[in-house]
Every structure is written in C-alpha cells, then in structure tokens.
Image: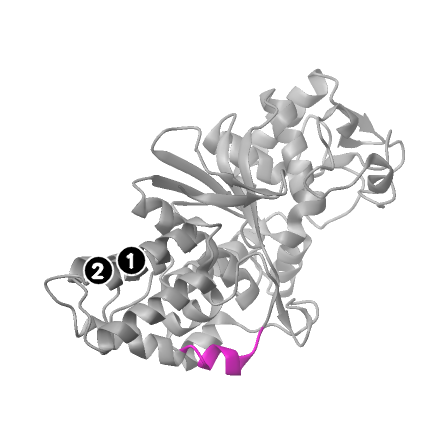
C-alpha cells in the first residue's frame, strides 16, 4: 500500500482515497506571465510519478492544475506588451503545456484559469459572509480564521506565532492573521465589479473557488511547493473547512522541496532560474527526469549540471536493457522489481527505487532475464523512454 507523508499530520500515512478507485488531486499551478523553470518542473514531475504509481495500483487519477492569471505580474506583462492579461495568460499557459509534454508529463487532466471562476469566488465569499465567518472592513473582505479548526497546523504555528506575520495588511482587520478574500482598496490596473465593491479576488480564494467548483466538498491530495504551506495552503484549508463543513476536506497535503540555484531558491525575481526549454535543447528529457527523481521529493536540491549529467550512465543502462528482454524474468530480478515498487510505495522514495533499477539493469547486462512486460512496467511507472524516439505511454 502506498504511504505518503502528510504535512498536516507530519507523518507517513496509508493513502486511502475518498472514492474507491479514483484519486482527485489539486496541484497549485504557475502564475502565467513567464516560461517554466526547473523548480516548477520538479513539482509536476513528482506528481506525475505519484500518478503513475497510483495508476500501476489500479487507481484512476483526476488531476486539476490552476493557472493564476489574476496577478499583478500578469497585468504588468500585458501593459508592457500592449495587450490583454488574457492574451498573456494564454501564451504562457500554452508554453507551460509544451513544457509538460516535452518532459513526458501526462497526468494533468484539467487546466483552469482562475479568472474563469470569479463569479464562483463571489458565491463562496457571499456564503462566508452570510455565515458570519467572513467580514468586511474598509471595503475589503476578510476571513475570520479564528473560526477555522486547527488553523496553523500545516505550517506548525501557534496563534501567537501566526499573529507575528504582517499578512494582508489593512485597516479594520479583527485579527492580524485573518486572510483577505477580496481587495477593494489597492489599485492593480485591473478590477472586477462585484457586490462587495470594485476590486480583485485575492489569491487564496482564487484556488479555493477552482477546487470547490471542480471537486465539491472534498478531494484527496493537495500538492505544491513547500514554500506554499504558509500562508497559501493554510488559508486554503481554512476556507475549504468553513465552506464544506468538513474537518478534513483534503486527505493529504503533499509538498515538494525547493530547487536551489547557487544555494538560493530558484526564482525569477532573483534572476537565477534554469529554464526548462533551454535544458531540453541541451539534454534528453529523460535525463532531466532521472536527475529530478534522483533526489527525494521532500528534500531541497541544489541544481548542478554535473549532477544532471551523472545520470547518463543509468539512462544508457536502461536503454541497453530494453534490447535484452526475454521470455522469463529471473527470480533475482523479480525480487528486485518487488523492492523497486516497495521503495516507491514508501513515500515515493525514488532515489532507492532508481538504485534498485540500476541493479536490475546490471544483472540483465550480466545475463539474468527480464520479460518485456516487467520491463515495460518499470519504465511506465518512472515515465522514461526505451530509446530517444519511442516513449512508454
């Protein structure tokens, strides 16, 4: 059985979805004003591996990714290019899809522009106001997080610690940690007319509305980078609990470590990003995939081109093994295949799984046998190619 580390409980848990054979997953997607860097790509490669493991165990996966186009960076890019924010979003969303395809990421079922859900955001905010869970202050709307159960649990903060953050600053807030839902006081070059006033739906409510409209009162996995735990995922959970009435509307919160560059977080603002489209021109996409999977998904990884290239020997072994499949699988190989799958079942321990795969390939090279079916399974779970032209679907 698959075990996943749940950021909410701080422990590995047996993963059992709400529905018997279907896993619903929400992954926080990109803000669509630029291309995809390796830090973003790592997130989707990890969840692609998770989906492949679930599919191998007979589960169907329904993966929803939001595209944030209500954002000042998007508006600024539109102004700079003398176009609309919608055109900017569509251009970079298309580039994002191309990146996913180039990396063999096939698990995403639906992409959702948050701007398509503004009316839904208004509905959800109205519900919270009617329940007196949200309140208006100087034109803005805030969520009263004191009414949410376990607020601060994902980020492991007490109320006193939460109160130290200068979050969504504005006059009239009841509590420092209260979360903004709708902003009517700041100027953003763009706004929506609403019953709350002319303004902008705020970040956390954007994602919540997308999830509610697509998944209803609950879903199984919420994913994204670890840096989103506070305030974004903390706010999202509070909103979802209060809207659904459920203590646990999300089964598991699964977070991916950061990709660093020069010891610092890879970030467009720092100018230290490694663009995936540039890496793809230089290296095999499966080499990039093996490099990402060579580190445990919860650990931060410092990008190193030398470390990436070091995975070439394993990729060559895999492609050599593809040429040496047989009619039977030797017992030694069968045991290693079992160990390979158990490693992935242990919170996606891909580094250990790759070590088992390397042993399998070496043993096949030295004369042990593996069937096409068994070899297919290993490649399909990892999402790697047999060769440079044919991808395992």
Image position of 327 with respect to 215: above or below: below
Task: Specify the farthest residue to the front.
Answer: 331
**Does 351 appear in magenta?**
no
Q: Nearer the viewer, residue 339 or 28?
A: 339
Circles 2 and 1: CB atoms closer than 8 Å: yes
Percent of width and height locating residue 222: 54, 41
**Does 309 appear in magenta?**
yes
Residue underneath mark 2: 331
Percent of width and height locating residue 162: 82, 40
Label 2 packing within 10 angstroms: few (<14), some (14-19), many (20+): few
Percent of width and height locating residue 364: 23, 73
Residue underneath mark 1: 335
How far is the residue under mark 2 from the one under mark 1? 6 Å
Q: Nearer the viewer, residue 224 or 156?
A: 156
Image position of 259 with respect to 18: above or below: below
Q: Is residue 388 visible?
A: no
Which region of the structure is painted magenta?
Answer: 303-311
């Amino acid at each position: 059985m698959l075990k996943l580390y749940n950021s909410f409980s701080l422990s590995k848990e047996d993963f059992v979805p709400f529905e018997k054979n279907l896993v619903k997953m929400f992954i926080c997607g990109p803000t669509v004003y630029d291309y995809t860097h390796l830090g973003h790509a790592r997130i989707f490669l990890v969840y692609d591996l998770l989906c492949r493991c679930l599919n191998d165990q007979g589960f169907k996966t329904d993966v929803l990714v939001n595209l944030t186009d209500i954002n000042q960076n998007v508006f600024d890019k539109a102004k700079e290019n003398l176009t609309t924010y919608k055109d900017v979003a569509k251009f970079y969303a298309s580039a994002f899809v191309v990146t996913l395809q180039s990396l063999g990421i096939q698990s995403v079922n639906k992409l959702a522009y948050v701007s398509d859900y503004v009316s839904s955001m208004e509905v959800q905010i109205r519900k919270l106001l009617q329940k007196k869970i949200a309140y208006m202050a100087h034109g803005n709307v805030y969520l009263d997080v004191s009414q949410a159960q376990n607020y601060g649990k994902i980020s492991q903060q007490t109320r006193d610690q939460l109160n130290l953050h200068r979050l969504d600053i504005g006059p009239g807030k009841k509590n420092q940690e209260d979360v903004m839902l709708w902003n009517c006081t700041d100027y953003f070059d763009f706004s929506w007319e609403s019953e709350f006033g002319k303004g902008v739906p705020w970040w956390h409510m954007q994602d919540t509305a997308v999830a509610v409209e697509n998944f209803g009162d609950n879903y199984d996995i919420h994913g994204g980078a670890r840096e989103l735990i506070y305030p974004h995922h903390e706010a999202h959970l509070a909103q979802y609990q209060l809207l659904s009435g459920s203590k646990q509307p999300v089964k598991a919160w699964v977070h991916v470590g950061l990709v660093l560059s020069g010891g610092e977080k890879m970030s467009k603002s720092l100018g230290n990003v490694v663009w995936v489209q540039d890496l793809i021109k230089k290296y095999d996409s499966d080499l990039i995939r093996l490099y990402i999977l060579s580190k445990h998904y919860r650990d931060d990884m410092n990008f190193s081109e030398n470390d990436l290239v070091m995975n070439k020997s394993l990729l060559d072994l895999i492609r050599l093994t593809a040429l040496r499949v047989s009619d039977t699988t030797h017992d030694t190989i069968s045991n290693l295949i079992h160990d390979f799958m158990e490693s992935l079942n242990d919170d996606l321990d891909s580094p250990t799984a790759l070590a088992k795969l390397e042993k399998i390939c070496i043993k096949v090279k030295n004369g042990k046998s593996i069937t096409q079916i068994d070899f297919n399974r290993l490649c399909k779970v990892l999402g790697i190619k047999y060769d440079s032209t044919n991808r395992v679907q």
